[in-house]
Image (tube, coloured by chain):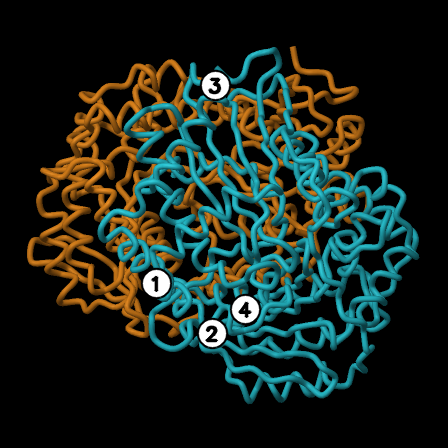
Amino acid sequence: MIKTLLRICVVSALALGLFSGAVWSTPATAGVFNPETFTLKNGMDVVVLPNHRAPVVLHMVWYKAGAADEPKGKSGVAHLLEHLMFKGTPKHPNGEFSKLIARHGGEENAFTSLDYTGYHQTVASDQLEMVMELEADRMTHLVLSAEDVATELAVVLEERNQRLEGKPAARLSEQAMQKLFPKGHPYGRPIIGWRAETEALSREDVLSFYKDHYAPDNAILVVAGDVDVAEVKRLAEKYYAPIPPRGLPKRAPLTTDAPIIGGETVLRDNRVKQASWSEHIIQPSLTNGETGRVAALEVLSELLGSGGTSRLYKALVIERPLAVSVGTEYMASARGDGQFVFYASPRPGVSLDEISKAVRVETQRLVDEGLADGELARIKKRMLADAIFSRDAMKAGAYSIGGALASGHRLESVEDWPEHIGAVGEQDVLDALNAVLAEPRRITTKLLPNGKGDGA
Amino acid sequence: MKKLYVILLAVALPLSLLSFPAAAVEVERVVSPQGIEAWLVQDHSNPVVSVRLAFRGGAEMDPSDKAGLANLAASTMDEGAGDIDSQTFQQILADQSITLRFSASNDRFGGEVTTLTENLDQSMDLLRLALTQPRFDDEPVARLKSQLIAGIQSDSQRPGKLAYNAFFKAVFPDHGYGRDSDGTVESVTGLTQADLKAFVQTRLARSNLVVGVVGDVTPERLAALLDKTFGPLPAHPTTPRAKEVVPNATGRVQVIELDVPQSTVVFGQAGLKREDPDFYTVLVMNHILGGGTFTSRLYEEIREKRGLAYSVGADLYPLDHAGLIIGSVGTENARVAETLDVLRSEWTRMAMGDVSLQELDNAKTYITGSFPLTFTSTGAIARVLVSMQINGLGIDYLDHRKAYIGAVDLAGVKRVAAEYLDVDKLDIVVVGKPVGIVPSP
């Protein structure tokens, strides 16, 4: 639908992965997904989410290593490794992994984010053992030739062309994140890597990242669908438990306390036909900064800028038709800092400065006048209902919980989410808003056509 | 992501390419007292109901000077109906956590309701109002037009959109399929409230409607809701469907210059319609050539062996009045010529009948086994129920699909490969700055 499509994704560069903070949610009773969990003796965490609607099972392994864990100068290596993980092992050489899964009617893929890398297969439930054997095998037995690396590097550079180079909005986002997270902060570089660094990656770089991070004590197994916990336990003991732990060091904290250059990032391109504006503001995540503010920030984002009934949409798209789209997004799921984002695209004849001022005025109105009667209750009711819908899809719980655990959050951050949302009061929302407004670590982006105009 | 396939135009068709093991779900035919039919899969494990509906006929029926009409109707029908104005309507949906929306594709006008069981009656009443008494007030129509126009303008610089539009325009020069279903800035600007009201009155009727429902609802309750919701629709649509058309793929090469480092290539030629007796055979053949796994020949030769592309694939594209085989690939400007050479040589190799029994068996087990994998949410299953009805597959289709695929043999694959794949008629559109590609005169 157009209304969703027009939420122009200046904010999306943080998530090459599939997980977004908004996925989880739920009823006010205990738990959201109510998973069963256990830990193998080598330290590998296991999450099981039984769901018997269809004879299908989703098998995922999440590594607690993403682009933000790369050594300096080696950007793109986490993602390149993800591609190369499909090449082969002594037991299953020559791309046999994908061939076997396809032959058994399975689907598979993988993703890399700043904080984690995930591999997943969806198969008929009687094929769980096959995919578990394959995934456990490649956790420590990957074999790479220099030629594999060279060919896959070409593929990755084409992926970069497709995702970034040809898209002005994506290039702007890449530049903006470098400013929001300056001085070599790992969140300031793109997941796919800086082109020059990625091009120079060698087979040894890839294998060294693999050895440093791919181990059972740095991984989470998530199995969802038509299985029971006893079966998963039996298979995990057979395939994953024998892999020796590495005793990997704890991940270093990711703080953004360096002074920020901030200001404005502007990108002009003659291919831009619809100008857009955004403001990215550092905020707490589930494990970084004032974590007690996370739930209030989620409610704030819902109320201020989520969908066609939000305050900003009503004010700037319907009542004073200044924008074709406007909204907010809050991303709490990072291992490092989170972000609160405002974004808007003006109607013809309206400048980006006008639109950003109007967003500020409307936001200030909430500070000055507070919430309307019943507004908070309505928003919370809607957010809590989302939890019931999220249980409708087999994969929702797997992605929410896998992403949370791989980012270093506790399971409770997902399962207790309804309680946290339920406890948010009006003053909490206003306090969260004031903290957003007062935060100095922020960056504005402007995407404009060529020329001197400001989008008008 | 490691592997992201270029997604073909967002049409609801791939559902027809799926299959399902018997006995996993039970599909019930529910017929209301007034004779309105829906297919139902009951699932009482979660208090959610998903309703999907489709009217036969879509953007292909938009008059040429009103291109984008079906799409604008889809975007505005949920913006107020009956006595309820736009903002109130949207507020009720938000407060009750009801998803109610419409969509338009070439051949269909689709609708979706997803709701908590406790709000099902209210949801269906809002659906009834939106289908039969949409208001199309000035403010929401102007607002949605401005959003759609902004989208069309942004799309005008997107390589994939440009390539597909040029491909369809060339292949269907005098048919609704040749026009972008979003319309143009000019055509959308010119659309009026009267156009929208006429759209609803002449195109949405009981005789061209199919309904699929999955979730926490009984057949008895559904039957009553069907009459209340869809009973007020007219019996028959009065706008005629578009005509049958033969795709005019002649092997031409178009180049659209765009200043981007990677060229986007769309290629295709005539295929077949869903009802064609050869459908499953061509489906299997195409899967071996370019289908949606990481093992197709195009994937293997273009990506795995040569690193020419991140995404490459080909799919069947059956429409109501024509059929296509269509694919796409993105590659660096300097390597387009090499990529096209590989593509053409694979196209020819398959056409010559160079295919093994092992490849056939692998394709069949994949196509059979992967079908149930999508049956993991109420909405996904409801979409399959709609697709089965639209395509006239029969309520027992899920039990028989495996046998249809199983019956495909090597001789059949070789026969259809020779019949359908003709490299001299492969139409190609390149968007970018390709090196060494000469467009057809």
Q: Is residue A105 at all visible to an observer of this figure? A: no
Location of mark 3 (residue): A351
* Discs 3/2, front: 3
- Where residue A310 sits in the image (x, y, percent)? 34, 42
Residue A384: numbered disc: 1
- Tell me if mark 1 has few (under 14), some (14-19) or many (20+) residues whose alpha carbon lies within 10 angstroms of its own: many
Amino acid type, mark 2: Pro
How much space separates mark 1 and mark 4, taking CA atoms?
17 Å
- Where residue B113 sits in the image (x, y, percent)? 27, 52
How much space separates mark 3 and mark 4, taking CA atoms?
42 Å
> Which chain is depicted orange?
B
Location of mark 2 (residue): A55
- Side of A323 where A153 appears, left or right: right
Q: Chain of mark 2?
A: A
Q: Nearer the viewer, residue B240 or A274?
A: A274
Location of mark 4 (residue): A401
How much space separates mark 3 and mark 2, taking CA atoms?
54 Å
In the rendered structure, which disc, 3 or 2, sits on the residue that comes first in sequence? 2
Same chain letter for marks 2 and 1: yes
